[in-house]
Image (cartoon, rainbow, N blue to C red):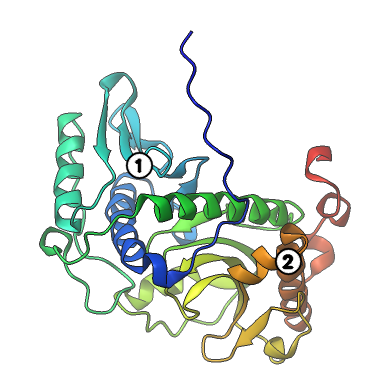
Amino acid sequence: MIETPVPAAPAAWPALPLAEWEDTRATLHLWTQVVGKVRLAQCPWINHWWHVPLYVTPRGLTTSAMPHGAGSFQVDFDFVDHRLVVDAGAAGTRTLPLEPRSVADFHRELMAALAALGIRTRIWPVPVELADPIPFPEDHVHASYDPAYARRFGEALVQADRVLRDFRSGFTGKCSPVHFFWGSFDLAVTRFSGREAPPHPGGIPGLADWVTREAYSHEVSSAGWWPGGGPFPDAAFYAYMYPQPDGYGDARVRPAGARYLAGAGEWILPHEAVRAAPNPDAAVRAFLEDTYAAGADLAGWERGALERPALRNSPPGQR
């Protein structure tokens, strides 16, 4: 029997200072957009664009199974062994190494790998939610890949996904999966009150207003984690309401490191504050619960009909 060496256990909440991996983060953002647009092209439409995100795996991110003809295929980012795997089941697999390469090369090689498996798909090859986007086939600017920080990113995703899934479990109203939006490059979970919302003003760079209005067609309380490069420069958990009720930014929110960004209209809890907490899971859970409860109460949500406190407060292994 051949035994695979077991690597050292990663830090539960790895450090992700943006200055140390900003170029890699920017390149990964665009690579996930290429893969995400394949999912957008292949999957049946689901409300609020739930057919387009990626999902966290123990190794990174996946499209999950996407239909193609009478079969299916999926594309996985493996940030442990640093490879992109296109798996078409009995039709075969193709693997691309994750290494320093331009977005243009990544786009070309992924399309070639799909074609080699008999999967011909057309995507709109322009990034979204970015100012001054460069079309994928022309982008030779973004070409960085630091494997150590890519792996840290994957490890941080696993931790954030785990805590967000636990938070999601006590809500019985309409709620999104915990999923990774490649446009904004963040992990998110969204709860719904069940009531329609006023039309969203839009204005997101590189995104048509009608796309945003579909995403926010109903009242939401949304929370998640981004790896840096957004309204707050470093990695952080965030929470917001749409529409935002008066007084939301004045709420009392735990833990001590949480703060409200008036310009963004969001609460944030820096990733470093989570890492420094005596109990990181409890710190994140307090942040998620407090921001949700404050917003839901101020907006007059019917919380009694939307939550199951007994389930929400029980340990995960007893659910």
At x 34% / y 23%, what residue is drawn? 89
Residue 280 found in image quarter = bottom right
At x 26% / y 59%, what residue is drawn? 144
Mark yes or no: residue 52 visible: no
Q: CA distance from mark 2 to mark 1?
A: 30 Å
> Of marks 2 and 1, which one's residue comes earlier in the chain?
1
Question: Looking at the image, which is closer to me, 132 or 153?
Answer: 153
Q: Secondary structure at mark 2?
A: loop
In the rendered image of this protein, does residue 114 appear above or below residue 310? Answer: above
Locate residue 58, reporting x and y percent. Answer: 52, 40
Report the amino acid beneath label 2: Ala
Locate residue 278, reporting x and y percent. Answer: 77, 63
At x 29% / y 75%, what residue is drawn? 206
Locate residue 165, reporting x and y percent. Answer: 66, 51
The residue carrying pointer 1 sits among few (fewer than 14), some (14 to 19) or many (20 or more) residues within 10 Å by Cα, namely many
According to the picture, the residue beneath numbered tag 1 turns out to be 82
In the rendered image of this protein, does residue 297 appear above or below residue 40? Answer: below
Locate residue 281, reporting x and y percent. Answer: 73, 58
In the rendered image of this protein, does residue 305 appear above or below residue 105? Answer: below
Question: Looking at the image, which is closer to me, 10 or 195?
Answer: 10
Report the amino acid beneath label 1: His
Is residue 70 shown left or right of residue 163? left
According to the picture, the residue beneath numbered tag 2 turns out to be 277
At x 32% / y 79%, what residue is drawn? 205
Residue 42 found in image quarter = top left
Residue 119 found in image quarter = top left
Q: Residue furthest right?
A: 310
